[in-house]
Image (cartoon, grey):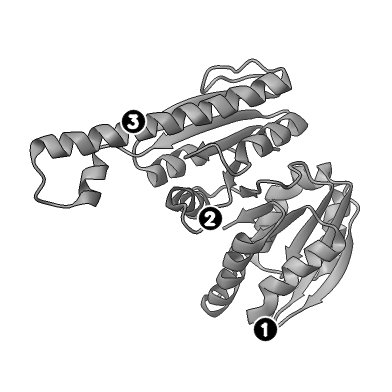
Amino acid sequence: MIRSVYIPLVDERGGALATGFAIGRALGANVEAVHISHDPSDAVALVGDGMTAPMVETVIEAARREAAERARHVQAAFHDLCRHAGLTPVGPGTVHEGFSVSFAATEGDCMQIVAEGGRLHDLIIVSRPQEEEEGKSLILDAALRDTGRPVLLAMEEAAPVPEHAVLAWNGSVEAARALAFALPLLKLAKAVTVLSVEEEGREGPDGAAVITYLERHGINAHSRDLAAEPRQTGTVLLEAVENSGGDLLVMGAYSRSRLRRLIFGAVTGEVIARSTVPVFLVH
């Protein structure tokens, strides 16, 4: 069950807010959006030594104004979505029966805030970071590595509620955890495809066993074998999702052996960078 959704933000761009609202409404979940600003005093360390006290204060004040402006933009985007959805926000941390949304702003180390805040939510939604967006990259890293929770990578233009979900299955523990966590979203989808990724030295259940597991949860799905060299898996996987008409990709973030972790880690990075549909990831 997904009853609590966490959306850590550094700006309003990227689709995480809209995705969170749609997923929250579809699942009847409490959605908590949190804007995170760096401590303005951290800006001094980025400038360098040899600064006078007035210079330090000027840098801190400029950083404070920039953070406040970003927070205003995020909050405005949040309330705009509330108006369009006919919603009245509840207070942060409020327990509400059914779908609700809340907004809060906080300041500090974004990785620590995401790690601590994300652990007590059923799903974390983050916007896919661009190369120059360090803040979003830090949020994604903390959400994946330090929460133990599933992460939905939102896209700017992709449909937020899945019609056709695609599961990348390689028999690993990570893929099994992704499958289990994603069940509420898979139940929303009208179609589910299991892409059984053939890997050298692969162990674990095959795609047919996954189909049986899904059927026990009331989900009809079909399986398709996917053969690819390790260095091509990301490209082949994304092409298979596109060719199938999938609008959600579910996958484990890493493989289980050290060698395969390096391979699958590269696949994960390629998928994050190039996917055009939301990606449901579990470390």
Return the residue nearer the eye: 180 or 161.
161
The residue to which callout 3 is attached is 65
Image-based side of 22 in relation to 142, left or right: right
User: Residue 242: image x %, image y %?
Assistant: 80, 62
Q: Are marks 2 and 1 in contact (CB under 8 Å)?
A: no
Q: Residue sitting at 68 percent across and 62 percent down?
A: 175
Helix, strand or loop at label 2? It is loop
Q: CA distance from mark 2 to mark 1?
A: 34 Å
Q: Considering only vertical position in the picture, is 206 above or below 220?
A: below
Image-based side of 244 in relation to 200, left or right: right
Q: Tell me the amino acid under the disc marked 1.
A: Gly
Image-based side of 107 in relation to 203, left or right: left
Q: Earlier in the sequence, mark 1 or mark 3?
A: 3
Q: Are marks 1 and 3 in contact (CB under 8 Å)?
A: no
Helix, strand or loop at label 3? It is helix
Q: Tell me the amino acid under the disc marked 3.
A: Arg
Q: Residue sitting at 52 percent across and 31 percent down?
A: 74
User: Residue 252: image x %, image y %?
Assistant: 64, 61
The residue to which callout 1 is attached is 201
CA neighbours of label 1 inside 10 A, class few (<14), some (14 to 19), many (20+): few
The residue to which callout 2 is attached is 130
Return the residue nearer the eye: 41 or 2.
41
CA neighbours of label 2 inside 10 A, class few (<14), some (14 to 19), many (20+): few
Residue 52, image quadrant: top left
Q: Considering only vertical position in the picture, is 256 above or below 228?
A: above
User: Residue 248: image x %, image y %?
Assistant: 75, 52
**Which of the two marks, 1 or 3, is nearer to us in this view?**
3
The answer to whether residue 256 is seen in the rendering is: no
**From the image, which quarter does the N terminus lie in?**
top right
Return the residue nearer the eye: 146 or 16.
16
